[in-house]
Amino acid sequence: MTVFRDLSQHILDIAENGIQAGATVLHIKITEDLSPEQDTLTIAIQDNGRGMDALALARVTDPWFTTRTTRKVGLGIPFFRQTAEMCEGRFEIFSTVGQGTLTQATFRHSHIDRPPLGDVGGTILCLIVGFPDGDVVYCHDVNEKSFMLNTHEIRQVLGDDIPFSDPEVLTFLRQTLEEGEQSLAMH
């Protein structure tokens, strides 16, 4: 059984859904508004995959529904929704056939049951390396601070000869993600 201990595991699961749906670009955005008036954490994952028709979209939060042929249930989206709603938040999913899907969950940031973000940098690195022919655009905002990484821009600098799995590139990506996340933690 799938157990999601932190929110980065939800991000990985939803992003993998997009990759399975033929996406070439994943946009992952985390927005934390720590002000007492807002107190929100929003995670949005958007892909440009094949999207879903209205019937599939209506059933996607049903744990007994999945489009994958490798298993009989699809627990990732229902768990993500349940986690958001348990934390005084909301869950939304929008999809258009041929254009892709946007999955978004908002949580009350300070809710006692909100799982930690987890290793978001490691998750993004895993997606980058495991999605060599696609691009990942990652943005994390905490109040007025922002960190962004776009693999399309990095790919333009590297050229076609150097893959993201190259040890020096991996080290650069890991350090960039770690430094970016650390810069957001200082408030």
Image (spheres, rainbow, N blue to C red):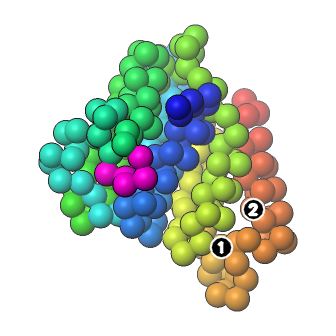
Under mark 2, the amino acid is Leu
Q: Quadrant of residue 174?
A: bottom right
The label shown at residue 130 is none
The residue labelled by disc 1 is: 154
Horizontal side of 16 relative to 157 (left or right) equals left
Q: Quadrant of residue 119?
A: top right
Query: In the figure, 125 relative to 187: above or below?
Result: below
Badge 2 element: helix
**Residue 51 at what x, y percent from top left?**
28, 58
Q: Nearer the viewer, residue 67 or 126?
A: 67
**How far apart are labels 2 and 1 at the CA level?**
10 Å
Question: Magenta span covers which residues?
Answer: 67-71
The mark nearer the N terminus, 2 or 1, is 1
**Residue 69 at what x, y percent from top left?**
37, 54
Residue at 53% in and 68% down: 135
Q: Nearer the viewer, residue 97 or 40?
A: 97
Q: Quadrant of residue 72?
A: top left
**Residue 94 at what x, y percent from top left?**
27, 46
Q: Quadrant of the C terminus?
A: top right
Asked whether residue 144 is in view, the answer is no
The residue labelled by disc 2 is: 173
Query: In the figure, 158 relative to 34: above or below?
Result: below
Tag 2–tag 1 contact (CB < 8 Å): yes
